[in-house]
Image: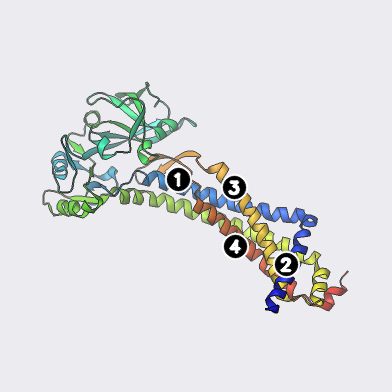
Amino acid sequence: MALPLNWFAQFAAITRFSLLSIPERKGACAAAAVGIGGVVAVLVGTLSIAQGFRQAMTASGSPAVAVVLRSGSDTEMVSFLGGESVRIIGEAPGVVSTAAGALASPELFVIISLPKRDTGTDANVPIRGVRRMSFEVRDDVRVIEGRPFVLGRNEVIVGRGAAREFSGLDVGSRLRVGKNEWRVVGLFTARGGIAESEIWTDSTVLQSAYQRGNSYQSVLVRLISPGAFDTFRDALMRDPRLNVKVVRQSDYYAEQSRTMVNLITGLGSIVAGLMGLGAVFGALNTMYSAVAARTREIATLRALGFGSAAVVSSVLLESLLLALAGGVAGATGAYLAFDGFRAATMNFQSFSQVAFAFAVTPRLLALGLAYALLIGLVGGLFPAIRAARLPVATALRES
C-alpha cells in the first residue's frame, strides 16, 4: 500500500504547486479557457437550433394518430385524396367512433406568401383547411385569444408562432391573399408543435377559394390505441378502392424533421471541429509555456524522487481544469443566450416556414462539457509527456 499512497502524495504536491502558479500565467490560462469556452458555446448554440426544430416537429406527433396520404407521397404537398377515399378511411377498423362520427380529419394544405415582421420580405406560410372534428383528432390545439372560426365563413385562426413571425395575422385583422379575404378571429397554441406555424380555416371555404372541389391532401385519424395502428393500416392497404400510404403521426413528423436536423447538426459539428482544432493549439501553447516556466522546479522534484507518472497526471489535471472552466463558462453562456430564443426556418419538405424555439437541453450541455474536456486532454497530453521526459541534470542547469 505504500506505493499508491506515495504516488498520491506526489501527485497532490505537484498539483498544488501547479495550481498556485496559475495567477502568474493568468493571461495564457485565460486565453486558453476563453478559446475552449467559445468552442463550447458555438457547438451547444448550433445544436440547440437542431434540437428546437426537432422538438417543434415532433411535439405534434402522437403514436395514437395515423396520417393517411396518397401512395408514393412523402408530404402533403404532393398528396391527393378524393371525397370517397376520405369516407372509406373514416370507416376503417381501429378508428375512434363518437356520437358525432369517426375521429377522422380530412385536411387541405395550401401555401401562401406573407411578409415577415422583422424584414418585410415574403415567405411561405401554410394555411390548412380543417373540419370541426380536427380539434378532437389534434387534441393539443387550444384557442388562447379570440374564438374559433365559424364553419362556412371566411374566418381563420392563427398559430402563435405564425402570428409572431408574420405581419397581418393579429386577431381582428383581415388576411388578403389574391382575391380572397379572411378575418383573423383567433390565436391558438399546440404545445409548441408545428401546427403553431400554420393558419387554420374551414376546409370547405378553402376548397372553394382555391377551386379544389371535393378533394383533400391528407386524413388524420385518432385510433382506439397505438396498438390498433397495424389493423387500421392493413385494412386500408388491402382495400382495392384505395391507393394510400399510412404512417404514424409521430413517425411522419420525425421524418419531416430529419433533413433539416441533419443539415444543421452536420454544419455545426464541422464548425465546432475546426474551432476545436484551434482551441487545442491554444491549450498546447498554454501548457507548453507552463512546463517551460517550471522546468527547474519539475527537475528538482524529479531529483527528490518524484515519479514521472505524478508529473504527467498533474499537468494533465491542470489542462483539464482549465478546459472545464472554459466549458462551463461556454455552456452557461450558450444556455443564457440561446435557450428559448424564437426563430423561423424553412421546412424543406413543405417549403414553408416553421416557427420554433432553440432548445439547450441537459444532453447538449453535457456534450459541450465532454468536448471541452477532450480538448483539454489532447492539449495537455504532449506537454505532460515532455515534462515527464525532461532530463533532470540538463533541466537543473537551465537558468
The quarter of the image holding the N terminus is bottom right
Label 1, label 4: how far apart the Cα atoms are:
26 Å
Give the mark, 1 or 3, whose residue is nearer the N terminus.
1
Q: Quadrant of residue 391?
A: bottom right
Given residues 129 and 15, the one toward you in this image is 15
Q: Compared to 142, does 71 lie above or below?
A: below
- Observer-side mark, 3 or 4, equals 3
Would you say the residues marked 2 and 3 are in contact, meaning their CB atoms lie under 8 Å apart? no
- Observer-side mark, 2 or 3, equals 2
Residue visible at 73% across and 60% down in the picture? 286
Q: Position of residue 17 (x, y in %)?
A: 78, 63
Crowd around label 3: few <14 · some 14–19 · many ≥20 (10 Å) = some
- Observer-side mark, 1 or 3, equals 3
Q: Of helix, strand and loop, which one carries label 4? A: helix
Give the mark, 3 or 4, whose residue is nearer the N terminus.
3
Label 2, label 3: how far apart the Cα atoms are:
30 Å
Give the mark, 2 or 3, whose residue is nearer the N terminus.
2
Q: Is residue 311 visible?
A: no
Residue visible at 83% across and 73% down in the picture? 300
- The kind of residue tagged 1 is Gly
Q: Position of residue 82 (x, y in %)?
A: 16, 40
Residue highlighted by disc 2: 12
